[in-house]
Image (cartoon, coloured by chain):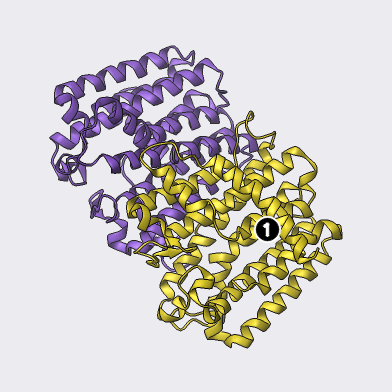
Chain colours: A purple, B yellow
Amino acid sequence: MSPHQLALWSEAVLARVEAALDAWVPARGPADLGEAMRYGVLDGGKRLRALLVQAAAQAAGAMATEAGSEAALRAACAVELIHAYSLVHDDMPCMDNDVLRRGKPTVHVAFGEAQAMLAGDAMQALAFEVLTPEADEGAGVPADLQARLVRILARASGQAGMAGGQAIDLASVGQALDEATLRDMHRLKTGALLRASVQMGAACGGLQPDAVAWQALTAYGHAMGLAFQIVDDVLDATQPSDTLGKTAGKDADANKPTYVSLLGLDGAREEADALLAQALAALSRSGLADAALQPLSDLAHRIVHRDH
Amino acid sequence: MSPHQLALWSEAVLARVEAALDAWVPARGPADLGEAMRYGVLDGGKRLRALLVQAAAQAAGAMATEAGSEAALRAACAVELIHAYSLVHDDMPCMDNDVLRRGKPTVHVAFGEAQAMLAGDAMQALAFEVLTPEADEGAGVPADLQARLVRILARASGQAGMAGGQAIDLASVGQALDEATLRDMHRLKTGALLRASVQMGAACGGLQPDAVAWQALTAYGHAMGLAFQIVDDVLDATQPSDTLGKTAGKDADANKPTYVSLLGLDGAREEADALLAQALAALSRSGLADAALQPLSDLAHRIVHRDH
């Protein structure tokens, strides 16, 4: 796929995801909770996690059946709901106290802190609701796949995943973290959910944990999770705020450790390139068809070589 | 069952639930996130939701199989995790700003606001993790039951349930709510999770939504959800703080509408008694065995006639 083809593929995928989120996050409902949830999740950024779900689902052959395709759509929306809720909570005054996100006022600025907290809480619940449709609304997503998707996403979101990484991050402000601890933090804080995205897509295609292809896609997800954060740190150190759509240099200002502060700019870039090579090697040993792997391969390049 | 027998039954049930929570909410893990989660959920109050799950599971025959019994234990712990996370978030300064809960400093007082928010978030994720054990850790809870329990709990927790009710509550401060809106708020804020507790227990026994017994237990759960809140309002208006283990009269002070402000003390008590009668009538038309229904019946009396 050329960059142009990747753009076309992404556009088609994201149109479906965006339409599904628009339908599954209703504005109706009590007070303006639904509005706050929609504000937090719709029209939202790069949708990297949704793209990883969909690309892995395609690699694993999920798109060949209606149930697999529906499951992959639900998994893509669920992981975006989890990611979006984490940003809503993370932006709040008691956490990062950010007032700008994707160039817009953050949810608590627009709706108040209490509503932002509730909207985040309800977005998390909705993620698990989306993964467990009733028989008459889910295009036949089998119960064992529903349960498996919940299992993957819940573990990646909680204490041993994203929330755990955020807790390390909280505790790390002003601390001199060594590289191992920094990696551990990011493996949980952003890596767990990115890896879970790939695993959910793989599960939608019916891959089981003992399959070579499952293990290869998991290795890909692990490498990309780490690479994503390293590139994030590089961009944070080198790009102006208006390109990023958020406040640049914030982590460095808060004396938070970053890969750049630890490895230097060149070191961080080299590490990202090494992880790209690892991810591509994992794909090539997966035993899956090259054509089906193309979106995952292209996404890996895009993640490492992005400029915002 | 005499009150003494109910106490013995509760004690045995809660010993299992408390031991399971102790095992499933690990202290280990990043920073002190695990400690904050344990502080928020262990040794926690009346455990009414866990008791409702277990009583409904017993009524529906879930305890006859190892898988049904394991599922009911997991459902009891999951609903307590959801309830506990909602209290942690609700107590925070941007919500109710409570410093005392069950006679102890609230989680954000003990661990800081950021950690309290993360702990609540991770407790919600853990609830869904507990409901979806791997094949080798769940005593054979079938996947379709796992998915169904997630479906019930996620819907009851989110926008169309607990979080939605909290949003109405937020918007209602200083407003003159009519009885219909007040009922609507409580149906969501506390009622949805209490009803879901009963439904999860019923699901563990294999009851399907078209069964008479399912509908009867759902009606019981609905009536008890409403009765619980009415009695809460009565106690809030009549009992001192040290009996309640929390700040009494707070809702009235904040000019929040309550059943007592709306119906008067006597009216609220009469309404609670009428709901008790409705709940008992639902049980008697369920077609389930009287002996199996005894814990649900006794719990209904206890909910309405409790003094704290």
Say left or right for B285 vs B43.
right
Looking at the rendered structure, the kind of residue marked 1 is Leu
Q: Quadrant of the C terminus of chain B?
A: bottom right
> Splitting the image into 4 quarters, where does residue B133 fall?
top right
Say left or right for A50 vs B126.
left
> Splitting the image into 4 quarters, where does residue B221 fall?
bottom right
* Image coordinates for residue B112, horizontal then vertical, percent: 33, 53
Say left or right for B63 vs A290.
right
**In what element is the residue under mark 1?**
helix
> Splitting the image into 4 quarters, where does residue A2 fall?
top left
Q: Quadrant of the N terminus of chain B?
A: bottom right
For disc 1, the neighbor class at 10 Å (few under 14, some 14 to 19, many from 20) is: many
**Does B55 appear above or below A28?**
above
Q: How many marks?
A: 1
The front one of A176 and A146 is A176
Tell me the residue at 33%/55% (across/down). B113
Say left or right for B251 vs B11.
left
The front one of A249 and B306 is B306
Residue with the mark numbered 1: B52
Let me know if residue A246 appears in the view: yes
Tell me the residue at 33%/24% (across/down). A300
Chain at tag 1: B
* Image coordinates for residue B267, horizontal then vertical, percent: 63, 86
* Image coordinates for residue B199, horizontal then vertical, percent: 68, 55
Let me know if residue A134 appears in the view: no
The front one of A259 and B112 is B112
* Image coordinates for residue B232, horizontal then vertical, percent: 57, 73
